[in-house]
């Protein structure tokens, strides 16, 4: 008796992948069909089948594990592309400034009548202009206030001029405004750093600027008026009002001499507040032709050496040092 057996493999396409394996046998006594697949399992047993004829229709080899791995790779690639797109969208927008910049100018007789007051005003005008425009990577302040240090008596509050007073002005216009605010013929007889620190702290709290980075820049000889045993008492300087405002508070005292600067850094009690001083002999070098290019043909944005000098000597990121 001659028996013929035919195997077929079919693949169905669509949203669901289906594979069906079927076979048919035929003999003189009749034909029988069975199929095995995902839904139908049907077997027909035959005895003494001695001759087999095989024919495969549409041979397809499916490696499901390989297919799953490919799909996983595609998903990972899509996830990376989506993350990159979202990150680009988030960073492409204008980043809001965070820095709170407070500037104090010492108009006591000792500093105003000294040899560096005019230079300090000129530098301050250039410094403010550079920061407001973000030149050379200098941080643009979110808020800025400019006021005098001290007054006619101890604990006297002074006017803080806001950032709008100096925005949209040239360096010369900013300088003119500073000369108007700090005239040399109206001196403060009392240099009160503590009152200035208290006013900074009060402004930060009222303006809801707590926890933002704070930079307090003071143009001063750095010599307090408080004496103890006939000597200048640097221990009387009180930074406590600034301690809890932010984790990043820096007090920068510019135009001191070397001895006064060292006293600020080693004797002023503090925990978190960072203190940076710069000597007057270093400060006056900002106008060096090799640092600040005098050629007016250069655009101010091209004063890269000056911006680098500011970052290294004024805006230097000093570490916190606890002094008890």
Image: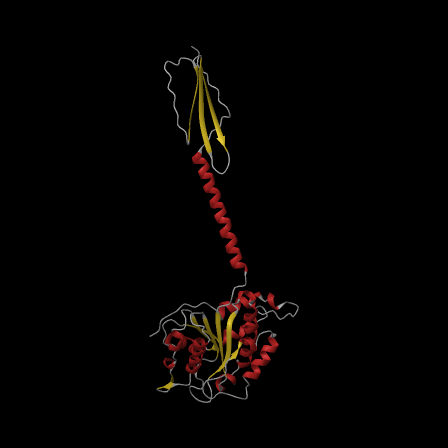
Residue 159 picture location, percent across and down: 50, 83
Closest to the observer: 32 or 144?
A: 32
Name which residue lies at 49% across and 32% down.
Answer: 12
Name which residue lies at 53% across and 65% down.
Answer: 137
Closest to the observer: 262 or 156?
A: 156
Residue 68 picture location, percent across and down: 44, 38
Please identify the quarter of the rendering in which residue 40 is found: top left
Residue 105 picture location, percent across and down: 50, 80
Picture layout, residue 60 above or below residue 143? above
Name which residue lies at 44% across and 26% down.
Answer: 21
Picture layout, residue 48 above or below residue 204? above
Q: Which quadrant is home to the C terminus?
A: bottom left
Picture layout, residue 320 above or below residue 173? above
Side of 74 where 177 appears, left or right: right
Closest to the observer: 238 or 38?
A: 38
Q: How is the image coloured?
A: secondary structure
């Amino acid at each position: 008796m001659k028996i013929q057996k035919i195997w077929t493999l079919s693949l169905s396409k669509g949203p669901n992948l289906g594979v069906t394996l079927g076979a048919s046998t035929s003999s003189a006594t009749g034909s029988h069909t069975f199929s095995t697949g995902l839904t139908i399992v049907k077997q027909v047993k035959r005895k003494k089948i001695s001759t087999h004829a095989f024919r495969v229709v549409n041979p397809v080899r499916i490696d499901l594990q390989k297919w799953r791995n490919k799909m996983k790779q595609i998903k990972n690639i899509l996830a990376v592309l989506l993350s990159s797109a979202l990150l680009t969208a988030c960073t492409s927008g204008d980043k809001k400034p965070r820095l709170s910049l407070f500037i104090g100018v010492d108009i006591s007789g000792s500093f105003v009548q000294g040899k560096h007051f005019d230079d300090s005003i000129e530098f301050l005008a250039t410094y403010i202009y550079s920061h407001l425009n973000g030149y050379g990577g200098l941080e643009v302040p979110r808020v800025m206030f400019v006021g005098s240090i001290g007054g006619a008596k101890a604990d006297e509050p002074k006017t803080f001029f806001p950032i709008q007073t100096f925005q949209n002005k040239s360096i010369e216009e900013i300088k003119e405004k500073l000369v108007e605010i700090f005239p040399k013929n109206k001196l403060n007889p009392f240099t009160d750093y503590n009152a200035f620190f208290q006013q900074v702290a009060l402004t930060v709290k009222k303006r809801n600027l707590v926890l933002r980075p704070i930079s307090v820049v003071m143009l001063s000889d750095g010599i307090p008026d408080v004496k103890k045993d006939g000597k200048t008492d640097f221990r009387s300087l009180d930074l406590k009002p600034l301690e809890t405002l932010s984790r990043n508070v820096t007090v920068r005292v510019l135009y001191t001499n070397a001895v006064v600067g060292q006293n600020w850094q080693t004797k002023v009690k503090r925990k978190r507040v960072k203190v940076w001083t710069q000597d007057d002999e270093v400060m006056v070098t900002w106008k060096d032709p090799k640092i600040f290019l005098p050629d007016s043909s250069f655009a101010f944005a091209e004063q890269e050496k000056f911006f680098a000098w500011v970052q290294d000597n004024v805006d230097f990121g000093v570490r916190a040092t606890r002094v008890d």
